Amino acid sequence: MLRRWLARTPPPAVLAVGYLVLILLGGVLLMLPPMARAPVTISDALFTATSAVTVTGLAVVDTELVFTFWGQLVIAVLIQMGGLGLMTFAVLIWSALGLPLGIMQGNYLREDLNQTSYVKLTRLVWTILRIVLMAEVAGAMLLCLSFMPHHGLGPGLWHAIFHSVSAFNNAGFSTFSPGLTGYALDPIVNTVIPALFIAGGIGYVVVADLFRRPFWRGWSLHTRMMMIGTAVLIVGGVAMTAILEWNNPRTLGQYDSTTARLTVAWFQGVTTRTAGFNSTDIAGLHDSTSLMYMILMVIGAGPTSTAGGLKVTTIFVMLLATWAFLRRRTEVSGFGRAIPLGDVLKVMALMSIASGVILIAIFLLLLSHDGEFIDIAFEVTSAFGTVGLSRAYTGELSDFGRAVIMVVMFLGRVGPLTLGFFLATRMMPRVRYPAGQVHLG
């Protein structure tokens, strides 16, 4: 019966149910006595499991103080499974069960992963697994150089492994109570952690292009958009963080040297879109900086990656469509390539749904909680972008507020990709209507 249901049910529905099952299983495991130093409530366990599976990083309990090694190991496994993403799991599950991909699902998978055949699609899955393994092992080995001198051989090794997995999967979970504020000026942490979450955030297709194809001319349109968009957002995020927070005594202003301030601005400016690690006090940010971070969190990183958000390519296509309209052009194009109308419509749908989810969640939390608007809006935006940064408001959430944030985290991670499958279904209209005039703007 299960095999028949899997064969008849669209992959997005199967994978969404799979994520829910994984969250429930993770929540049950985290409630077991060996996992925590003190009893963990159902709400705490489910919220932590949801945050881990959706690679968000928001936490209602202290990961270092509450969970034992075994509990932290469960969180790391949930992060790894959630970080691999829907596309990879779709191929792995269907291949493992011996089920053939349908024409619509197979074609969309190939297009979304930028492949031209099922053979290349399968190869990409194994490429993804190799990239994950190499990146996380290398990251852990390098982080040992910083963590072992402070925590000893065994604990230092575990901290390095956990942070490597969390960073590459853009989760933002840390086994240190204050996050990475204690390593705000550590050169290894400020190099390895950003390298891991940037590599995980730009997407596996882009990483494969960078290693296998010649510079620029050999890159696909997707890779060009991702590299340019990522570079602009990194430079803009770091520069604006430095400008806005330079004299803030709670963030950059607490450091005397220019090098120290630029180091913290670098880390916090690049981590905001995807990973959610903090090397400074997020609650101490100016409101202007918080608003900028909210924009970056909504944008997110790349498709087929470990990160969430609307994705860089979505925003890129939106800007190209806007530019085409302003230039009175009937075709959207970029870098000498036309962008199909279906992709433009998908961008509009994704942005509309994202806006609706974020606004409804903010409205519900404002109705049920007493808190500053900027704190609540920041929390919701971080959840949707699966980032994990918080202005110290996560602990203030009621059970209803936690449920809202859990739904937002789930939709932020699963929703846009799941929607993409259904948007890819092409149906020829049986009736054509005469054109009508609508006054816009």
Image (tube, rainbow, N blue to C red):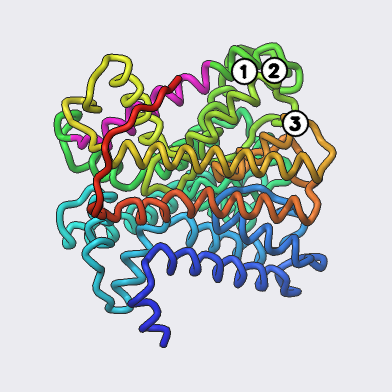
Q: Nearer the viewer, residue 52 or 108?
A: 108
- Most extreme residue toward the right is 370
Q: Which mark is residue 373?
A: 3
Q: State the image coordinates of residue 16 (x, y, percent, origin top left).
A: 48, 64
Q: Which residues are magenta?
A: 219-239
Q: Earlier in the sequence, mark 3 or mark 1?
A: 1
Horizontal relation, residue 337 to residue 383: left or right: left
- Mark 2 surroundings within 10 Å by alpha-carbon count, few (fewer than 14), some (14 through 19), many (20 or more): some
Find out whether the residues at labels 1 and 2 contact each other: C-beta distance under 8 Å: yes
Horizontal relation, residue 423 to residue 63: left or right: left
Question: Residue at 26% across / 55% down in the picture?
Answer: 427
Residue 229 is inside the magenta segment: yes
Q: State the image coordinates of residue 116 (x, y, percent, origin top left).
A: 15, 52
Dot 2 amino acid type: Tyr
Q: Earlier in the sequence, mark 2 or mark 3?
A: 2
Dot 1 amino acid type: Arg
Q: Which residue is mark 2?
A: 255
Residue 141 visible in this rendered orientation of the protein: no
Question: Residue at 54% across / 41% down in the picture?
Answer: 385
Looking at the rendered image, the quarter that the C terminus falls into is top left
Q: Earlier in the sequence, mark 1 or mark 2?
A: 2
Residue 436 is inside the magenta segment: no
